């Protein structure tokens, strides 16, 4: 087995681990009895990205990309279904509308790629740009919490395991993209490495729990 196969399957296995972190979110939804304060955007974005990368993998005949894409579609679809079942009734209409619009957009894109591009290379180019954009959005989604992290000087708003997994996965896919000389794999994952580094750096400079000012009653004994 050569280095390309070793890196590709390492990246595939680590990607599966990253996709599986959605189970933690589903368990949190179950514990709190609803989806309050939890958005379905990461599930939706990753599912759409998986669809695009599956098609891209088929176009360039890349088995690892196809495998990861199919795994992503299956797992994220299950997460979205779980979210839908547990969201409040008044939110289901909005959820359904956004879901339909998003998947309709992807279907239109895939129709364009299949029937309206001039040739195979053009199809790969256009789909590669869009899929890369979705990948960057997925890697950058945890940074939405950065404002709260800086404001409260705490990383309790972020998940260390997901940030670390994102960094490892993007690093492996960057190496794989470089080995197979595919810029649409290398560039977005290279950006993912940078974004992952930023997230891990935040865990270094800020604690995982919010800093609280402790006040003591005058009659209470002072801490030793």
Image: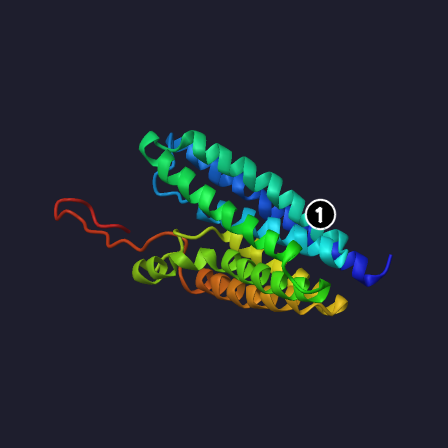
**Residue 18 drawn at (x, y percent):** 59, 49
Q: Is residue 25 above or below residue 63?
A: above
User: Which residue is found at the position 59% from the left and 46% from the top?
Assistant: 19
121 with respect to 29 (left or right): right
122 with respect to 93 (left or right): right
Between residue 97 and residue 62, name the one nearer to us.
97
Give the total of numbered labels. 1
Q: Secondary structure at mark 1?
A: helix
**Residue 164 drawn at (x, y percent):** 56, 56
User: Which residue is found at the position 55% from the left and 44% from the top?
Assistant: 21
Between residue 88 and residue 54, name the one nearer to us.
54
Quarter of the picture holding the N terminus: bottom right
- Residue 10 visible, this angle: no
- Residue 178 visible, this angle: yes
**Residue 2 drawn at (x, y percent):** 85, 61
**Quadrant assignment, res 188:** bottom right
**Quadrant assignment, res 176:** bottom right
Label 1: how many Cα within 10 Å (few below 14, some 14–19, many 20+): some
User: Which residue is found at the position 65% from the left and 55% from the top?
Assistant: 115
Between residue 159 and residue 105, name the one nearer to us.
105
Between residue 133 and residue 10, name the one nearer to us.
133
User: Which residue is found at the position 67% from the left and 66% from the top?
Assistant: 122
Kindly identify which residue carries mark 1.
Answer: 67
């Amino acid at each position: 087995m050569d280095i390309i196969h070793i890196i590709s399957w390492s990246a595939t296995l680590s990607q599966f681990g990253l996709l599986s972190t959605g189970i933690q979110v589903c368990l949190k939804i179950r514990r709190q009895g609803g989806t309050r304060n939890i958005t379905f955007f990461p599930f939706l974005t990753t599912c759409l990205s998986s669809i695009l990368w599956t098609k891209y993998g088929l176009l360039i005949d890349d088995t690892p990309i196809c495998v990861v894409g199919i795994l992503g579609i299956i797992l994220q679809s299950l997460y979205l279904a779980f979210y839908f079942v547990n969201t409040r009734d008044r939110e289901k209409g909005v959820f359904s509308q956004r879901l339909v619009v998003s998947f309709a957009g992807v279907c239109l894109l895939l129709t364009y790629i299949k029937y309206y591009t001039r040739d195979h290379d053009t199809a790969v180019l256009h789909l590669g740009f869009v899929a890369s954009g979705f990948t960057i959005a997925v890697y950058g989604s945890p940074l939405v919490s950065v404002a709260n992290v800086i404001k409260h000087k705490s990383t309790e708003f972020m998940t260390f395991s997901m940030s670390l997994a994102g960094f490892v996965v993007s690093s492996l896919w960057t190496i794989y993209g470089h080995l197979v000389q595919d810029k649409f794999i290398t560039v977005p994952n290279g950006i993912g490495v940078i974004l992952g580094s930023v997230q891990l750096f935040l865990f270094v400079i800020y604690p995982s729990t919010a800093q609280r000012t402790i006040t003591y009653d005058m009659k209470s004994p002072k801490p030793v």
